[in-house]
Image: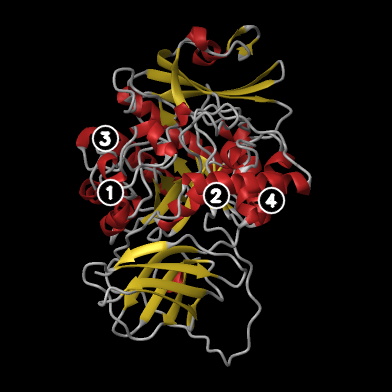
Amino acid sequence: MTRSTFKLRLPRGFSRPVAVTAALSCALLVTICLIFPQHSVFQVQPPGAHPTVTATATATEPKLKASEPSYPISGYFISASSRDAVNYKKLEDIKAFGGDTVITFGISLQPATLESIPRGCEVDGKNCARVAAGSLSIDRYFTFLDGSNWGKTAIKCPRDRRVTNNGQSYVVLVLPKSGPGCTSSNGKYDVVVVGGGNTSSVDPSHSLAKAATKLGMKFYAGMPAPSKRADLPYLPDDSYQGTLSAFTERFLAYHASANDVPGLAGFYHHTEMPLTDSTTFDSVLAIYAMQNRAIHRLLPTRQAIVSPYIDARVDGGITTEKTRNGIRRVAQTSSGLVLNIAIQDGMGTGKGAAFGGSEFGLMVDPFAATIVGKGTWGNKYFAPNRDYFSAAAAGVSGTGAVLWANLEGMAPATDANACADSLRGQTTKARLDRQLQQLGTARKIISFMWDSYFTCQGTGIPLKEQIKLSIATPIITDTSFRPDAGRVVVVGFNLKGSTVTLKWTNKKGQALEKAVKAATTNSTYGTQNGMNPRLESIGVDVGATSVSSTKNYYSITVSNEWGEESTEFHAQLP
């Protein structure tokens, strides 16, 4: 999900007559069926003990009014606007869509020269950085041009100044090269030019935090990050980590003074790394630790999000064992705050894969093939995402960090799925459903990215409109089947009022099928088990039976009380 590979633009509004939408929906369904044939199979190995159902609802009890269905994604990366009305409307739309969390990506603290300082940042016709520096000994210059309008509380030191010129606003910070406070112990300083927003516009972060507060939502602001190394572009340039640390302090102090509202839930680290235990990425972990310490000290009630990515590709990828060890190393950077580790599932970049054990021999889908080439899932990937998230859940256990999932809401680009001017393409609702089946161990599911991927017209219908057409789809994330007791338990989303259809082969080799109404329901399964609070479980009694020792696979589909049916979920008895 590396931000530098995207050129994102706010999409124009989209509306179509109902008749046209219906026609496009039919075309979309045909496309989905071609991409995801019915013979696709999932193998599930439930971790630990079988899922259990603790709350019951018998047939004699009065039928309660069903709660509204919702899609399992509850947070989205977004682009910030400098207009209050735009930000409020976007968050309002996301809340109506079932989301409660928004995240901005953040930008880098970039090395600069006096010549590269924005020409608009001038004081009496002179370069603002040079004016702020005065007679001080300046080591380096930097810019942090996030389009913001930092206010007067950002001015902490005698040389700091706020500059407005030709309708543009900047803050110039003079940071000591050594020591705290405003005076450098070694006599050297760095100068950072911040902002570049229009003087008539609102500060984007303040605007989003205010909107989140009004709507009862959570906003995570992007943290400053270093630029990339020229020789190794997958690593941060740590040659100015001291300056980054000093600027981080000023960045957070400004939020503490000017943006300390309930809607500001925390901060997002946009410096990325693969989920691995390799020491190659120690410089990234050092940034996480430094900034987490600063967040916890200056805004102790706030949390942080970090989003390392899965790379399951056989050609140069990372095993599940390295992932289990790697997430533990990430968790150890928390420095006392609540650290949410939102693993990128890699489905938008071709680095991760949503397939089951019995699908190892099936060909990768057309999207993945654009990245890894034609071949089978088993030849191209070490393991499915389900295995990586299970390994991560084991690795993070006991650390205090929280396992989230960052579902990549786009797909590798093909000739048929262009999305605005992005280098990635629009995905499909069916592909998202498959991704969600793999993420049952995550406490919360967020997605990159609302704009453009959920809002662009793409293949004809914006992704958010595709989801609205079938928002109540049941998503199965886990199952267990005890043939001797005839007991089936299903875990997932939107399972209320479901009928479960079980298919299996008995010891005589007979292919059997049985559809049974759920006998028990637990709508608080996720909360009770420390998992995603939206997870539910249902229990079904199919009668005692047997399962073939050579064909010990079974499949389950669910039809819920909203009349929606799940993707067929295939599993294997342990």
Task: Name the disc covering residue 429, or none.
Answer: 2
Identify the mark nearer the N-term, 1 or 3.
3
Q: Which mark is residue 92?
A: 4
The single residue placed furthest to the bottom in the displayed view is: 60
- Residue 230, picture quadrant: top left
Is 361 left, or right, of 105 in this rendering? left
Res 407 visible:
yes
Which tag is nearer the camera, tag 1 or tag 4? 1
Q: Residues within 10 Å of mark 2 (few under 14, many from 20)?
A: many
Q: Position of residue 217 (x, y in %)?
A: 60, 54
Query: Residue drawn 60% across and 45% down?
Result: 28
User: Which label was assigned to residue 281?
Assistant: 3
The amino acid beneath tag 2 is Lys
Q: Is residue 210 visible?
A: no
The N terminus: image quadrant? top left
Residue placed under numbered mark 1 in the picture: 383
Q: Dot 4, crowdedness within 10 Å: few (<14), some or many (≥20)? A: some
Amino acid residing under circle 1: Ala
For numbered disc 3, what is the local secondary structure? helix
Q: Nearer the viewer, residue 411 or 183?
A: 411
- Element carrying mark 4: helix
- In front: label 4 or label 2: 2
Q: Of the residues under marks 2 and 1, which one precedes in the sequence?
A: 1
Who's the residue at 42% across and 32% down the image? 2
Marks 4,2: beta carbons within 8 A: no
Disc 2/disc 1 C-alpha distance (Å): 23 Å
The residue under label 4 is which amino acid type? Glu
Quadrant of the image containing the C terminus: bottom left
Image height check: is 266 above or below 130? Answer: below
Relative to 48, does residue 166 appear above or below in the rendering? above
